[in-house]
């Protein structure tokens, strides 16, 4: 699943969460969160965990599909 790093960064900043705090709240390692944000992709389950930790729906952190 493609995710939007900027949206994750903005949402976590809005909640006053550091990357380490977000990773802990999502139940994933800090390294894994960093890798996900760098690649811009992750498994659907990881996206759900991150979204829940941020208190939003997965659609809010997902990258919109580009039209051909």
Image (spheres, rainbow, N blue to C red):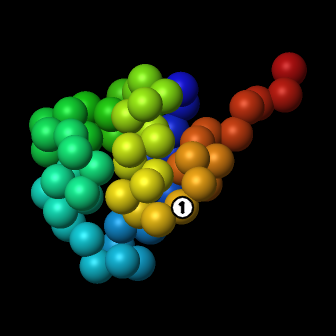
Left or right of 68 in this view: 51: left
- Residue with the most extreme right position: 68
Q: Position of residue 59 (x, y in %)?
A: 64, 47
Residue, disc 1: 56
Q: Position of residue 52 (x, y in %)?
A: 43, 55
Q: Position of residue 28 (x, y in %)?
A: 21, 40
Decide: is 38 above or below 53: above
Left or right of 1 in this view: 25: left
Decide: is 64 above or below 20: above
Q: Residues within 10 Å of mark 1 (few under 14, many from 20)?
A: few
Q: Position of residue 11 (x, y in %)?
A: 44, 67
Residue at 28% of width from left, 79% of height from top? 16
Decide: is 16 above or below 36: below
Taking depth in this image into account, of 42 and 48 the one nearest to the observer is: 48
Image quadrant holding the C terminus, namely top right
- Residue with the most extreme top position: 68
Residue 12 picture quarter: bottom left
Residue 18 seen anywhere in this rendered image of the structure: yes
Residue 19 seen anywhere in this rendered image of the structure: no
- Secondary structure at badge 1 equals loop
> What count of labels does the image hold?
1
Residue 27 picture quarter: top left
Left or right of 22 in this view: 4: right
Residue at 47% of width from left, 65% of height from top? 55
Taking depth in this image into account, of 64 and 53 the one nearest to the observer is: 53
């Amino acid at each position: 699943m493609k995710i939007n790093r900027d949206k994750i960064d903005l949402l976590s900043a809005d909640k006053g969460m550091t990357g380490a705090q977000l990773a802990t709240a999502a139940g994933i390692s800090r390294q894994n969160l960093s890798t996900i944000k760098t690649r811009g992709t992750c498994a659907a389950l990881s996206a759900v965990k991150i979204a829940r930790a941020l208190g939003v729906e997965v659609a809010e952190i997902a990258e919109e599909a580009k039209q051909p």
